[in-house]
Amino acid sequence: MQVPLFPLRTVLYPGGPLPLRIFEPRYIDMIGRCVRDNSEFGVLLIRNGSEAGPASTYDVGTLARIVDWYQGSDGLLGITAVGGRRFRLISSFRQPDGLNIGDIELLTSEESLALPEEYRPLAHILSGVLDDLGRLYESMERHYEDAGWVGYRFAEILPISPEDKQSCLELDDPVRRLQMMKEVLNSVRGPETR
């Protein structure tokens, strides 16, 4: 399977929102094709380099589907995408316009797993936080009973390094991801979340 790639300094998780402001012609063209064909693009975390120039990326990323777009008052294209399936990058090549195209394999989707009782307080905290985060999360379907969904949402909003966010994406164990997020939350908030 081949998809256009969008290397970023952020990690996109399945089910998560991705707001972007697009100004480079290669990405404006890519977004136009994705909207026209109702197709996805791949988001990969940058390991070295920059979003506007050459970059090396991690091999595991997430497919993104555009759900909204607008033209900002500054003339830039704004989009909101939502994360879909995780994938592994097999190889890539650069088109003449600078857009990277990747040969990818889709990774197995996590089975839905009921949120274990010990992590129910995390769902309660998350509910309050998402309500305060505004437009990006207001129309999101919420699955507070799903361990994977809760873990991914905490991984995207907690102040952890991009490398730790990438580790959360690569983890195949939603309970282990929840444990990692609980440890981070305890270090940020204190003992009341234990």
Image (cartoon, rainbow, N blue to C red):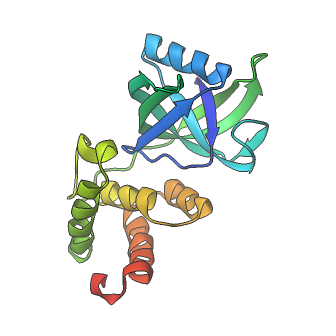
Q: Nearer the viewer, residue 137 or 92?
A: 137
Q: Please provide percent x and percent y for residue 46.
A: 68, 47
Q: Residue placed farthest to the bottom in the image? A: 191
Quadrant of the snapshot with the N terminus? top right
Task: Please say whether residue 116 is visible from this viewpoint.
Answer: no
Give above or below for 157 relative to 23: below
> In the figure, 153 relative to 194: above or below?
above
Residue 71 in picture, x, y percent from top left? 45, 22
Q: Residue placed at 79% from the left, 16% from the top?
A: 96
How many labels sit on residues?
A: 0
Residue 92 percent location from the top left of the image: 73, 30
Asked whether, in this view, residue 181 is left or right of residue 147, the answer is: right
Q: x%, y% of residue 57? A: 70, 45
Residue sitting nearer the eye, 173 or 65 = 65
- Left or right of residue 51: residue 145: left
Q: Which quadrant holds residue 24?
A: top right
Relative to 6, is 185 above or below?
below
Q: Residue at x 36, y 43 (%)?
A: 15
Name the residue at 28% across, 62% down: 129
Q: Residue furthest front?
A: 73
At horizontal 22% and vertical 74% (from top left) the residue drawn is 121
Q: Point out the residue furthest to the top here.
A: 36
* Residue 81 lies in quadrant: top left
Residue 123 in sight from this viewpoint = yes
Q: Horizontal placement of 33 versus 178: left or right?
A: right
